[in-house]
Amino acid sequence: MKTTAIIMAGGRGERFWPKSRASMPKQFLSLTDDGKTMIRLTAERHLSIVPWEDMFVVTNKDYIGLVREQLPEIPPENILAEPMAKNTAPCIGYAATVIRKKYGDAVMLVLASDHLIQNARLYLDTMAQAVEVALEGDNLATVGITPSYPETGYGYIHFGSDGEHAGHKGVYAVRRFVEKPDLETAKGYLASGDYLWNSGMFVWKASSILSRFERLMPQVYEDLCLIENSIGKDSHIEVLRRCFERFPSISIDYGIMEKADNIYTLPGAYGWDDVGSWLALERINPTDSHGNYLQGNVLCDGTRNSIVVGADKLIAAVDLEEMVVVDTKDAMLICRKESVQNVKKIIEHLRASGRSDLI
Amino acid sequence: MKTTAIIMAGGRGERFWPKSRASMPKQFLSLTDDGKTMIRLTAERHLSIVPWEDMFVVTNKDYIGLVREQLPEIPPENILAEPMAKNTAPCIGYAATVIRKKYGDAVMLVLASDHLIQNARLYLDTMAQAVEVALEGDNLATVGITPSYPETGYGYIHFGSDGEHAGHKGVYAVRRFVEKPDLETAKGYLASGDYLWNSGMFVWKASSILSRFERLMPQVYEDLCLIENSIGKDSHIEVLRRCFERFPSISIDYGIMEKADNIYTLPGAYGWDDVGSWLALERINPTDSHGNYLQGNVLCDGTRNSIVVGADKLIAAVDLEEMVVVDTKDAMLICRKESVQNVKKIIEHLRASGRSDLI
């Protein structure tokens, strides 16, 4: 059975303002020193197990041009345009119908387009094992990340004690997917040793996930079948639009994973990072001897533990500590590290004041 | 006897980098909300006591164009070009010879081109009284500023107890000019009540200061006489160059005031500010309800007690405290308030790395 990759690339990524914009979200930006964009890194990472012609991208219709430009090797018909954003469940369901229509059935690696993996070899070993698990019965496999601190921004996976499944070592039955916890709960999860971070990456056959849609989201499944039938017909875009309008906006975790059976997780330790804010830059890139991550035309004096991303003009950073500075052609962010989440407020201000050109 | 104004405008003003540059020092910048440059404000401030034709500017030859542009009302022959910077003693001596040559004698208001005065009326009343003092004998008058904190960056004036001089109230004999003190000494000065800040503004007749040059700096005086003789002749520029090459680089305070007699000071309380660093912007301009001084295209969220001077692009300032941000076309400064003096280090870095285009 074929193995395909489904790269989800519909996100807006406001947390990387001012570099990310509505017209240029995070997955299309380069945030690493190699200069490659996030989505390009994601695709290339899987080339040894999925050839270009079996890679698919699901994205908002507005970003089709960016995907084609950054991933010209992917066949244009594999770039799936969502008429509107309805979170991950409709996105994945849509991709699964395309896979079923094209291949009958195939394993799907469901991937975020904007995460980073430090050790690709260990990662691919884990994914290969996840494919083995997914090929058995109607198993749903997910890679879980061993937590290193009580993060409240991720969902968690409560996993069972038996670390062996049908001859695979390091494969644990999932007891439960749980949503983002509060800090106390997250601390308890970390202390228990029974919880992993939900990376949002999944491995399953198209048939396995579609059977869960049929059972757990039957209305959605009906529409997914309508979409599948319309593929290759003149009516496709119109059917897609009508179905997406009806779809609830719901994540695959909430819609399926929290309720499904036969889920297995493979704890991963390969340097996963969801690159959730500007602070990620100092985790995923080397820093200098003062703990700074500096990019571009930056001159520091006494500056420590700061992230400065320059553009054209010189930035002289004097005695900054724990700061984030990001320059672009038309807007600049200067922010304390602890306040990076407040970038959203700036976007709200801009929206309220009619400066959509800067969003 | 005529009253003339001598505006000293040869300073380089590195402390206002990146707005000030070698080719555009602080006195030629606008730092106040009225949009007028420092030197223009200085000249206009004295118009009620000195007409344009009796105003003189002494500056480096490189800045003649800027002075003509910003003060077109001053007769071109009143703009005196120093061949090189030799601190204030040669500068003032040169101006005094020009005054003696042109008017026989005249009162000179010797003025910094880059200081601010908040209350012009009180200031002019003080200056008018200083002119009265200067007209008597060979008195040297200076306006001293009542210190509000133990500043270590200024020279001080130790003044006598008798506050009346020849019928003028509020005029004190100067006991001694003292150089920049250390913090302990400055605290002592403040506590004693016997010390004023030396504002660097002086009032005297040309004949009075030239007689002091003759007595206290006889070598310099000889050269000043050579310069005076050459005025209006073809040899003038060459004589000027040769004399300035020989002049020691020395301040009027050190060269004359610390040793001279018959000096009187008029304590001023009219909101004097030497605008010595970016921090001055929040003293000399109104701040918002969060204590911020914001200029240009700036959007704040949670930012307090900061100074942000924008240029073309939007600056989003999130949760900054006690920061200074200054944007220009080709360079930007981001700095903690307590570190503004370290801007000099940035200029040194730039010089060392051959980026004189940014200095």
Image: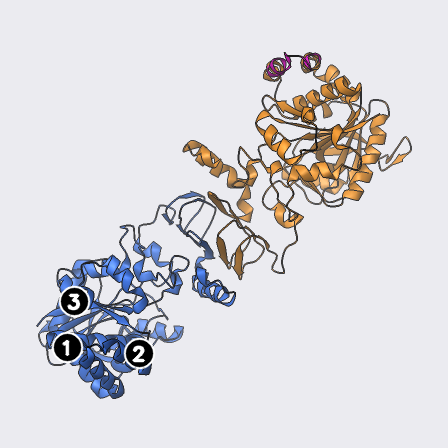
Chain colours: A blue, B orange
The 10 Å Cα crowd at callout 2, few under 14, some 14 to 19, many 20 or more, is some
The answer as to whether the residues below labels 1 and 2 share one chain is yes
Q: Which residues are magenta?
A: B229-241
Task: Assign a secondary structure to mark 2.
Answer: strand
Task: Name the disc covering residue A127, or none.
Answer: 3
Q: Amino acid at mark 2?
A: Val
Viewed as shown, does residue B67 lie left or right of A181? right
Mark 1 to mark 2 CA distance (whole Å): 29 Å
Residue A8 position in % (x across, y down) = 26, 68
User: Which chain is home to disc 1?
Assistant: A
Task: Name the disc covering residue A100, or none.
Answer: 1
Residue A16 position in % (x across, y down) = 38, 60
Viewed as shown, does residue B83 lie left or right of A48? right
Mark 1 vs mark 3: which is more N-terminal?
Answer: 1
In this rendering, the label closer to the viewer, 1 or 2 = 1
> What residue appears at the point 33 percent right and 79 percent down from the top-left corner?
A249
User: Which chain is home to disc 2?
Assistant: A
User: Which chain is home to disc 3?
Assistant: A
Rendering quarter of residue A333: bottom left
Q: Quadrant of the N terminus of chain B?
A: top right
Which residue occupies the foreground of this view, A159 or A131?
A131
Decide: is A123 above or below B105: below
Q: Amino acid at mark 3?
A: Met
Count the numbered circles shown. Answer: 3
> What residue appears at the point 44 percent right and 65 percent down from the top-left corner?
A344
Viewed as shown, does residue A291 lie left or right of A42? right
Which residue occupies the foreground of this view, B261 or A164?
B261
The 10 Å Cα crowd at callout 3, few under 14, some 14 to 19, many 20 or more, is many
The residue labelled by disc 2 is: A178
Is residue A104 visible in this depiction of the protein?
yes
Decide: is A114 above or below B27: below
